[in-house]
Image (cartoon, grey):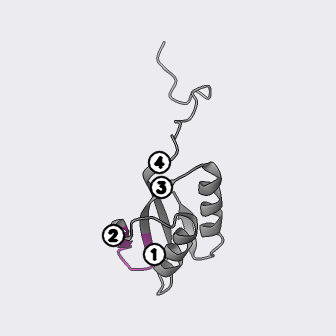
Amino acid sequence: MADNVNDQSTPPPVIEFPCHNYPVKIMGEASDTFLEFVLATTEVYAPNFDRNKVALKQSSKAKFSSVTVFITATGTKQLEEYHQALKANTAVKIVL
């Protein structure tokens, strides 16, 4: 019998904390303040993130932007609070 790819009994991958270079991708409406908001929010939840590794991409029509930051994830509470703070901004559409 073939392995069931959708098997619900398979546990999700475990992240070992601290997890350095943990990527977070934030996509939202392009604006002059979108990148500033993402960086300021990231600074609150991961103050030592490397600003030199920030990647900014625009959609083909420049309607949307995606920002990828690499943080040191210290635990699930930090990640949950960080994601909630990002999603609180109406310009943010997706946080991965």
Distance from Cα at disc 2 to Cα at disc 4: 18 Å
- Dot 3 falls on a residue whose secondary structure is strand
Identify which residue, 91 or 85, lies in the foreground: 85
| Mark 3 burial class by Cα count in 10 Å: few <14, some 14-19, many 20+ | some
Residue 36 place in picture, x, y as percent: 49, 81
Residue drawn 53% across the image and 78% down it: 37
Magenta stretch? Answer: 54-66
Counting residues from the start of the chain, the first of labels 3 and 4 encountered is 4
Is the Cβ of the residue at disc 1 closer than 8 Å to that at disc 2? no
- Compared to residue 42, the image places residue 62 above or below, namely below
Mark 3 residue type: Thr
Give the residue number, with chain letter if any, for mark 4: 19
Give the residue number, with chain letter if any, for mark 2: 52
Counting residues from the start of the chain, the first of labels 1 and 2 encountered is 2
- For residue 68, which quarter of the picture? bottom left
Give the residue number, with chain letter if any, for mark 3: 72
Counting residues from the start of the chain, the first of labels 2 and 4 encountered is 4
Given this view, does label 1 or label 3 mark the residue nearer the observer? 3
- Dot 1 falls on a residue whose secondary structure is strand
Mark 1 residue type: Phe
Distance from Cα at disc 3 to Cα at disc 2: 14 Å
Q: Is residue 61 magenta?
A: yes
Distance from Cα at disc 1 to Cα at disc 3: 26 Å
- Compared to residue 22, the image places residue 59 above or below, namely below
Counting residues from the start of the chain, the first of labels 3 and 2 encountered is 2
Residue 64 bears which disc, if any?
A: 1
Identify which residue, 23 or 5, lies in the foreground: 23
Is the Cβ of the residue at disc 3 closer than 8 Å to that at disc 4? yes
